[in-house]
Image (tube, grey):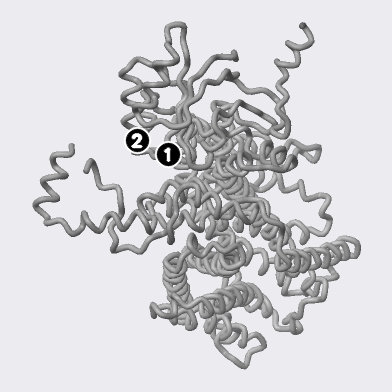
Amino acid sequence: MAIKKFVVGCFDDEDVLFPAVKKVRSAGYKIHDIYTPMPIHGLDKAMGLRDTSLHTAGFIYGITGTTTALSGIGWIFNKDWPINFGGKSHFDLPAWIPITFELTVLFSAVGMVLTFCYLCQLAPFVRRHHFNLRSTDDQFTMVIECTGKTNEASLEAFLQSIGAKGINVQHAETGWWLGSYANDKKPFESKAAVTV
Amino acid sequence: MASIKYESQVRSPLVNGQKDYHQVTEDIIRPIEAAPSVLWWTGFLISVALLTFGIISVTHEVIYGVGQWNLNRTIGWGWDITNFVWWVGIGHAGTLISAILLLFRQGWRTGVNRAAEAMTIFAVMCAGQFPIWHMGRVWMAFFVMPYPNTRGPLWVNFNSPLLWDVFAISTYFTVSLLFWYSGLLPDLASVRDRAKLKWRKAFYGVASFGWSGSTKHWQRHEALSLVLAGLSTPLVLSVHTIVSFDFATSVIPGWHTTIFPPYFVAGAIFSGFAMVQTLLLVTRKVLKLEEYITMEHIDVMNKVIVLTGSIVGVAYLTELFIAWYGMNKFENWAFMQNRVNIFSPYGWSYYLMMGCNVLSPQIFWFRKMRRNLTVTFFMSVIVNIGMWFERFVIIVTSIYRDYLPSSWSTYYRPSIWEVGFYLGTFGLFFTCYFLFSKFFPVIALAEIKHILKKSGGVYKEKMGAIEEEPLEEFAHEYAHAH
């Protein structure tokens, strides 16, 4: 969570974006993020992002569900309150399969969605800075972080040369804050005003 | 030419017209930003009126008891369970379209999946009402959940198909809701970022969870959708299987059949697709989305309807054959006397079911019929009437005559409160659907953009030049591109 300086370049076409990503990276600039209106397959690889482990988390949640169901029902029917259902076995595994399956799916799905929201920091009333409002419509927005060594003018010229449009410089908060999209008030700004 | 990006022109495009990304956003979000039409208000108010009637009927039932329904000595399950199974069945198409077709890489699902998933959620909500209110003392409904209690603790019976149903339906509802809403996040963000009005910015800001479209988020989102699809695929098959277990694990002649699980699942998909057709034919017309929900989509869904309708037909005939071949007197009676005999009290409903579900969908073997909107709409309603009667036939004709002729019941007619309850669920369903179509994008925006350059009408034309190239030249170019 810090306010940083970024150079923003917008692209209209993913076919221009891909070679641009390659060039920006080989020129040594640090891509903060690329915001796109839809998933672009291969962009994560091109940006050098590692693969997500969300699948593994889903698997772990799933087996937790399986274990919960089997151990729960097993304990209830054998230890806590054994009931005689027409002389059938107390350990009646085939009859438990439906509930075990459902709980596996339920735990896995709920766990994965919560993990997804946690990892991406998504929740109701969460607000963040959006560099370009058209990046949920038709533009691909590349955001490059300015470090101490970055020469803005040459970076802007470079972005222009690789096909970016609407290039601009923005100071932005990288994290999120609680707030409404209906007003632009930022909690940290008002705090600064008080101290002044 | 680096790679082949466009789909062959042999397949018809999934998005018609001159569209670019921005145009797609415009077309799909336009109905949300426009004021609701007179047609919308009319439909919405009728739905709310039906819902009100339903609430009155249920209130009456809660105050005076389940005796207000015309259930009797042998018909302990009448309209309520028929309606329950009918709504659950309808709730199967959404997840089938969004999950199974995603795994099978069926591009056409993108045009219809969002609305179909919404429909699934609303249908399951309607279905859930019936077992809950049938309990009579509805304030004790939480007894179906296993929790440590002061009655022993006396636990629920985990070996009972009725409890499996509780788990199956609630899991199905939860997972469908999560799947649907996680897919909606990016689209709600699109509405938010275009919003001019203050309330709209605030509302969609909250609803979109602060989605930004970051590449890392998209990567996780794709992984999430794929795994949820993988989980939902066996789930959707399990739900109606378990519903069929409610009947199949009993020893009632007519219910005690091993064919039930696949037969119920096929029937569920059949009725679900019919309901999707009913809703989408109206939606595409009213919201002017003909270029996204194309004739191609309607054609494909009609193919699914004729396939599943025929599977259901084979199941009906297999049941009859086994009833005869099994040489069980009671089983044979349930089928030959209570159903096939047209002069038996409920014989008419059996033939209504056969006509609507097996014979009439055969019209869809003809391409012309599959692409005729009037025929499709008419058929989608017929199929759902037929599927309602299927459940009615299974339930009522199996139990109205038990082993003791002296208790054979009088003719079962639902009371006004039973009918009111059923109409009330229509009210609930359509109220939800009208609100959904007004406030949410009815087509998966990001997914359409994702397939636009591959299957969009304009882009497919670019494939023409590539397809006309001589094979050697094409192979040469393609080999050197890598």
Can you give x and y, in whole percent of width and height, for residue B208 in the image?
63, 38
Secondary structure at numbered mark 1: loop
The number of discs equals: 2
Mark 1–mark 2 distance (CA, rounded to whole Å): 8 Å
Q: Nearer the viewer, residue B39 or B333?
A: B39
| Residue B82: image location, x then y, percent | 66, 69
State the residue at coordinates (28%, 58%). Answer: B8
Name the quadrant containing residue B92: bottom right
Which residue is the site of mark 2?
A: A16
- Residue A81 vs B356, above or below: the answer is above
Residue B317 location (% of width, % of height): 45, 79
Image height of A117 relative to B288, above or below: above
Chain letter, disc 1 residue: A
Q: Contact (CB < 8 A) between labels 1 and 2?
A: yes
Left or right: A110 in relation to B22: right
Residue at 28 percent of width and 63 percent of height: B10
Give amino acid for label 1.
Answer: Asp
Q: Chain of mark 2?
A: A
Label at residue A12: 1
- Judged from the image, the secondary structure of the residue bearing numbered disc 2 is helix
Q: Nearer the viewer, residue B413 or B430?
A: B430
In this picture, residue B115 sits left or right of residue A167: right
The crowd level at tag 1 (other Cα within 10 Å; few <14, some 14-19, many 20+) is some
Q: Amino acid at mark 2?
A: Val
Q: Nearer the viewer, residue A93 or B270?
A: B270
Please tell me the numbered disc located at residue B298: none
Judged left or right of residue A31, residue B335 is right
Give how far across and how far down residue B465 sits, in percent. 22, 56
